[in-house]
């Protein structure tokens, strides 16, 4: 079956919420490369939107997941498994948090974190403490709760009314946050780097001010590290760059290397609000997902792994800044580690199409930004390969 027939039949049988499909059909992957049904090779600078931490068809990863599935792939959440224990212990041991709740996706993790914060606040501050402060330009997911705190009005307006008690502030503007605080404020949720709107990092001083504000006003501080977590920025969690500890953190994407898995991490003061029956997830923490997550964590925590991310990220950023200085169609370069945003002065779609034709697959962000998210195992030679394509295209 050729790609034209696959795409046509797929479009006929699936809903159209993703817009026009890519004009290629990916058949397989290996390392940082993808191969389509015509046998063409593509350098993957999307990594499943920051999900494929270890790239494609990693032998050790495949063995870990398939070995677990050959034993048991699912159990009710009241059963503990060795894989679930191992993942939880690795996350707790390598973070500032005390306990973990496992989910399936990023948006489900955000839903759970908002529920946890609201329950904690109602029990700690009083029944009126139900409100949330979030940020314009943010993205936290597409379920009703997560969408209600996502700063993309074009999405939220379709499904209005959103959750009540949501107030908006501006990234890196502490005055705009303070203006929204009241005794009813339960939590503040923020991405250390806003990915969807254009890769916009928070400032260290701003996050420190948020921490001080939350401590003073008894507000839960939630970091959404769904895209930035698990090494993407050169540290296991982006908050480590800023020296600020949140009370609750959400994870997904890179934690499972493509296997659906999410997590909520929380300090004990907050996690204790989830008592028996307060929250749940049928497939959250299933053994196969936990085998995937355990393997990923062991790999990214190996000596030198983060060093490679930092080195390759620096090489990518320096290369892009060199292209910008040479007069290429680049207005700005920003980000951390292997999460880089490139503002371009040519039409975004034209650039994405041209990159694909030359064998490079970046991702979009906002309306005029390329988001570069290669697998964390990328080498400096592969970074140079991607830069050469961008040089030719831009």
Image: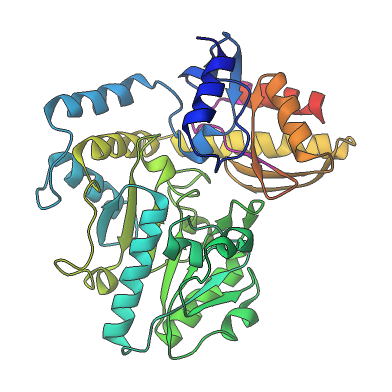
Query: Would you say residue 337 sits in the magenta stretch?
Result: no
Say left or right for 353 vs 70.
right
- Magenta span: 370-381
- Report which quarter residue 257 is drawn in: top left
The residue lying at 73 percent from left, 48 percent from top is 367
- Residue 70, compared with residue 189, is above or below; it is above
Q: Quadrant of the C terminus?
A: top right
Residue 334 visible somewhere in the drawing: yes
Residue 84: x and y in percent read 19, 44
Position above or below: 243 against 254: below
- Looking at the image, which residue is at 74% across and 23% down? 388
Q: How many marks?
A: 0
Side of 228 where 277 appears, left or right:
left
In percent of the image, x 40 and y 60: which residue is there? 110
Is residue 32 in view from this perspective?
Answer: no
Where is 184 relative to 249, above or below? below
Relative to the observer, which residue lies in front, 318 or 252? 252
């Amino acid at each position: 079956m050729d790609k034209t027939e696959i795409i046509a039949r797929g479009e006929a049988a699936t809903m159209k919420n993703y817009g026009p499909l890519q004009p290629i059909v990916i058949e397989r992957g290996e390392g940082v490369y993808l191969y389509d049904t015509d046998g063409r090779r593509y350098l993957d600078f999307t990594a499943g939107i920051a999900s494929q931490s270890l790239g494609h068809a990693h032998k050790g990863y495949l063995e870990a997941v398939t070995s677990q599935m050959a034993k048991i792939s699912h159990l009710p959440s009241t059963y503990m498994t060795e894989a679930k224990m191992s993942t939880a212990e690795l996350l707790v041991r390598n973070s500032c948090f005390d306990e973990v709740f496992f989910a399936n996706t990023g948006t489900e993790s955000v839903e759970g974190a908002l529920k946890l914060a609201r329950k904690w606040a109602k029990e700690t501050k009083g029944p009126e403490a139900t409100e949330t402060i979030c940020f314009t330009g943010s993205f936290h997911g597409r379920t009703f709760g997560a969408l209600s705190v996502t700063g993309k009005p074009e999405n939220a307006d379709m499904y209005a009314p959103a959750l009540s008690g949501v107030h908006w502030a501006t990234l890196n503007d502490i005055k705009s946050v303070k203006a929204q605080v009241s005794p009813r404020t339960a939590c503040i949720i923020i991405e250390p780097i806003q990915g969807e709107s254009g890769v916009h990092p928070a400032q260290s001083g701003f996050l420190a001010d948020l921490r001080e504000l939350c401590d003073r006003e008894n507000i839960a501080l939630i970091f959404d590290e769904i895209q930035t977590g698990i090494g993407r920025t050169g540290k296991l969690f982006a908050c480590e760059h800023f020296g600020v500890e949140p009370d609750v953190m959400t994870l997904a994407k890179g934690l499972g290397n493509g296997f659906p898995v999410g997590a909520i991490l929380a300090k004990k003061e907050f996690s204790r609000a989830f008592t028996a029956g307060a929250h749940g997830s049928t497939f959250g923490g299933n053994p196969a997902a936990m085998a995937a997550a355990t393997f990923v964590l062991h790999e990214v925590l190996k000596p030198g792994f983060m060093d490679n991310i930092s080195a390759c990220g620096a090489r990518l950023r320096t290369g892009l800044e060199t292209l910008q200085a040479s007069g290429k169609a680049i207005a700005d370069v920003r980000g951390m580690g292997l999460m880089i945003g490139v503002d371009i002065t040519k039409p975004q779609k034209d650039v994405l199409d041209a990159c694909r034709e030359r064998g490079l697959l970046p991702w979009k962000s906002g309306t005029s930004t390329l988001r570069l998210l290669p697998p964390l195992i990328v080498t400096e030679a592969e970074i140079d390969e991607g830069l050469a394509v961008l040089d030719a295209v831009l």
